[in-house]
Image (cartoon, rainbow, N blue to C red):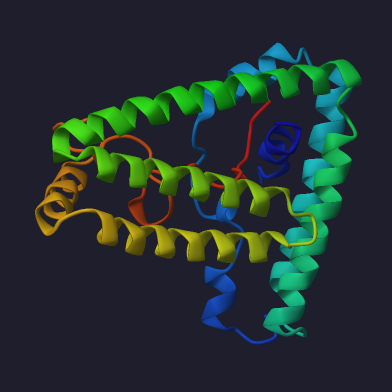
Amino acid sequence: MLPVLAMALVFNANAQEIPERKADYPPMMHHKQKGGPERHKAMKELNLTDAQKEQFKTEKDAFRKKMEELKKNDNITVKEWKAKRESLVKEHKAKMESVFTPEQKAKMEQRKKEGQAKQQEMMKLRAEKMKTQLGLTEEQSAKLEKSRKEMGDKMKAIRENKALTEEQKREQMRELGKKQKENMKSILTEEQLKKMKEGRKQGPGRGEGPGKGPKGPKGHKTPPPPPVEKETL
C-alpha cells in the first residue's frame, strides 16, 4: 500500500517527434484520476502534517518540472527518453515515500491487508455470479478459479519484481492479459463467450452481464496493476 499511495501522490501535475513517444507517456499524464474517494479517505486517515503536505507539494512541483523538461528534449532517442523517465519516476517515488512516518506506513500496510481481503471476497462473488449467468459446469468453474489464482500470483510477482522497470511491468501485464483471454476461450463454450461479450457491451451499471464492474487487461476480471495516478491533498 505504501508504494501505491506514494505513487498516487506522485503525479499532479523529442529524439524526433515520434508518435510512440506521445503514446508512451506515463498513464497518469493521460487519464483522469480513478478511485478518488477511497484514496482521499486513505490519505485523510494518515493525518498528514502541514509540513508533510508542503514537502509533497514541493517535490511534486520539482518532479513536474523535470518531466516537462524531459518532454521537450529533442536530442535523445525514444529508448533514452524512456530510461530517463523511468529514473525520474523511481527517484521521485523514493522521495515521496520518505516523507511518511513509521506510524503512517503501518497504517498503510493495514489498509493494504484489508483491501486484499475485500478484493478476494469481491472476486468470489463475481465468480458465483458468472457461474450462474453463464451456466458454468463445476469443471469449468474449477478451471476458471485456478486460472484466476495463477493470474493473480503472476501479477503479484510482476508488481513486486524490483528488477523490472515500470515499462517492463506494464508490458508483462499486457502479455498476461492476452494469455488470460486465450485461456478463457479454451474453457468456455462459444455460447458462453457470446453471453459474456453481450454482458460487457451493456457496460457497468447496466444489465446483469458478467461484464459489470472493474475490468483488468483487455476487459478481463483481473486485479489491475498498481495505480500510478495523481492525488490532491
**Lateral position of residue 224 relative to residue 198, left or right:** right
Compared with 6, 22 (above or below) is below
Q: Quadrant of residue 214?
A: top left
Compared with 21, 148 (above or below) is above
> Residue 178 placed where, x, y %?
41, 64
Compared with 131, 77 (above or below) is below
> Residue 202 placed where, x, y %?
16, 42
> Residue 96 placed where, x, y %?
83, 38
**Lateral position of residue 133 relative to residue 112, left or right:** left
Residue at figure coordinates x 71%, y 41% from the top left: 7
Residue at figure coordinates x 56%, y 71% from the top left: 22
Compared with 55, 170 (above or below) is below
Residue at figure coordinates x 64%, y 30% from the top left: 232
Q: Between 47 and 113, which is closer to the camera in this rendering?
A: 113
Task: Please identify the residue farthest to the front as the structure is shown.
Answer: 139
| Residue 148 visible within the image | yes
